[in-house]
Amino acid sequence: MKSLGSFRRKFAPWNDPEAKPFIAIENVTKKFADFTAVDDLSLNIYNREFFALLGASGCGKSTLLRMLAGFEEPTAGRILLDGQDMRGIPPYKRPVNMMFQSYALFPHMTVEGNIAFGLKQDGMQKGDIEARVGEMLKLVKLERFAKRKPHQLSGGQRQRVALARAVAKRPKVLLLDEPLGALDKKLREETQFELMDLQMKLGLTFVVVTHDQEEAMTMADRIAVMDKGKVMQVATPAEVYEAPNSKFVADFIGNVNMFEGTAAAVANGKIDIAVEPENFTIRTDALKSCAVGQPVGFAIRPEKIRISRKQPADPSINSAHGEMWDIAYFGDMTVFHVKLESGRIIKAASLNAVRTVEDPLGYDDMVWVNFDTDAGIVLTS
Amino acid sequence: MQKFIASVASRLVIAVPYFWLLIFFLIPFIIVFKISLSEVAMSIPPYAPAFDLSAGWQGLKDSFGQFSWDNYIWLVEDPLYYKAYLSSLLIAAVSTVLTLIVGYPIAYGMARAPATIRPTLLMLVILPFWTSFLIRVYAWIGILKPEGLLNQFLMWAHVIDTPLNILNTNTAIFIGIVYSYLPFLILPIYSALEKMDYSLVEAAEDLGCPPILAFWKITFRLSMPGVIAGCFLVFIPAVGEFVIPDLLGGSQTLMIGKTLWSEFFSNRDWPVSSAVAVVLLLLLIVPIVLFQRAEARAQESEK
């Protein structure tokens, strides 16, 4: 059986109708004066899930996270954590800890002092605190830096202190606000895997807010794509990428070629789309109920488009003639921009799997872009 | 050549403030110190020995020989002086604490106000400086006197039946000092609080700290440099304050500034009043220097 993309682990409580959500966000609305930051939003997050809230700035993802932490109260709706209604429970009484975007390390305390801070508030025994702090330092590999102050650490080390401090109290849920935002690219990639390891090891539920889709795709079990205070789609990274449910999600995640048209023929559940303004027909085998003449969109990822010098002989393959307009070479892959006769630019990506190519494509070459009937997504919203 | 000019120029820039301190602080201090070692004399100036350059080198040497510590011994022997010192320190300390109690919430409120109205609030704090200090202290007489505005208001509101006797008491001095020095305390605390990242407080609350404790452990702790600077700015001038105790305080109020004034103008005893001034300066400078050293060492160890 075919499935979408790759999957990391056999963990999918959201497909189990029996499974109880660990965090249930029920019709939550948050208004600031006349601005609605979160708009009648409902979400279920399961125990031990690595959940990402993904969206552009101002989409309400941070507000949602702050409501989970208790810094904001919902204007309407409710949040249940492990079955308990969180309304009116202040941040310092919630079994939830947060890792702040700025890390918010206490500058007047050492690394140890920062990690021990939350434990002291709980009135833990001194010996137990020391043991737990040692354990946390080991977990984030900062044993040698226990006595340092935050300003004596590098960005990556500070990030790890913030993480250790937030998990030291063994919260039921760890909230992470742009956890890797302040790190450089290389460190970010390493840290992503460290975070995933840590989440597995501790068996915690992670809710991470990010605007970086690569980060969300790499780390999360599921992603909620947000826009204007609403959730547009909640799905696994592969589903969000390969089967977006709307033009917004298709466009927001990754690169995409987007066509607008109308359903020209619907037969055996397969839809042919007449594309404006080129007047050509894209044949798809998308299984979507849709009336003839209904406006539909068609989204196709660049890596699913091939480029050839000759038109493919198989008439079932979609193809269009165009001129090589731009070539973006990234090393690992190349993105070709082909200009169709209508003026539309089609992006096609190909992996540079071999080092040498005979007769490479160049500027101004006349080429055919072509793709299979199952390569793209038909979008009705 | 250009390098030479640049180095001379940079030295000059550094030299200017030192030169300023030399002319307007060190030299006057030496003159005051010299007078404090002299004796009262019915002459102009009213002390002896006075340097007389016409007497030549030998004359100068002779006058050095006449210096004595008698005035300092006198300060220790007469209880009036150390009582005045102690009472000044006490009044200044109490006023500083009161100013902190009034000023900290104001500074905190300003720092947490929306960024758009902060400049206006800052302006309001600085605004009283546009009126003369002396006039503002005089105005308090009008407010505090038995038939003044405060008593009239309280009696009109039926809070009291007989006027409160505030003017010419230590209470009036406290009110005067708190009012006059409030901006000096608010500004450094405000600037410390304004720089603080509020997410630190949220982090503390997130880690299980109730708001009041989070304020104490994070906000107040991180504003300490501002609090210390502000307290010094109030305490030091308050110890030597003269105008406020003279106008608002009673005749029984003992403050060193007033003592110094009467030694100088009423008794025309320049040497003793100079000795009073030198001791006052040492009393304030020595602890401050020690404190700053300790601070610097603490900061050094943090690095």
Image (cartoon, coloured by chain):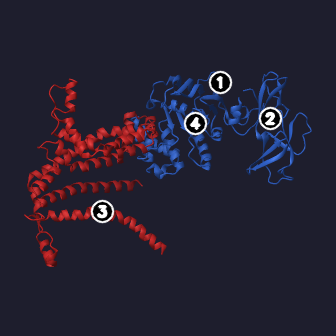
Chain colours: A blue, B red
Query: Residue pushed farthest left?
Result: B42
* Disc 1: which residue: A16
Q: Chain of mark 1?
A: A
Name which residue type carries label 1.
Asp
Q: Secondary structure at mark 4?
A: strand
Q: Chain of mark 4?
A: A
User: Which quarter of the figure has residue A308?
Assistant: top right
Label 2 vs label 3, nearer the camera: 3
Residue B285: x percent and y percent?
25, 56
* Disc 3: which residue: B21
Residue A357: x percent and y percent?
84, 53
Q: In the rendered view, would you say A362 is above or below A237?
A: below
* Disc 2: which residue: A375
Residue A208, which numbered label? 4
Q: CA distance from mark 4 to mark 3?
A: 58 Å
Label 1 vs label 3, nearer the camera: 3
Q: Secondary structure at mark 2?
A: loop
Q: Nearer the viewer, residue A127 or A375?
A: A375
Label 4 vs label 3, nearer the camera: 3
Name which residue type carries label 3.
Leu
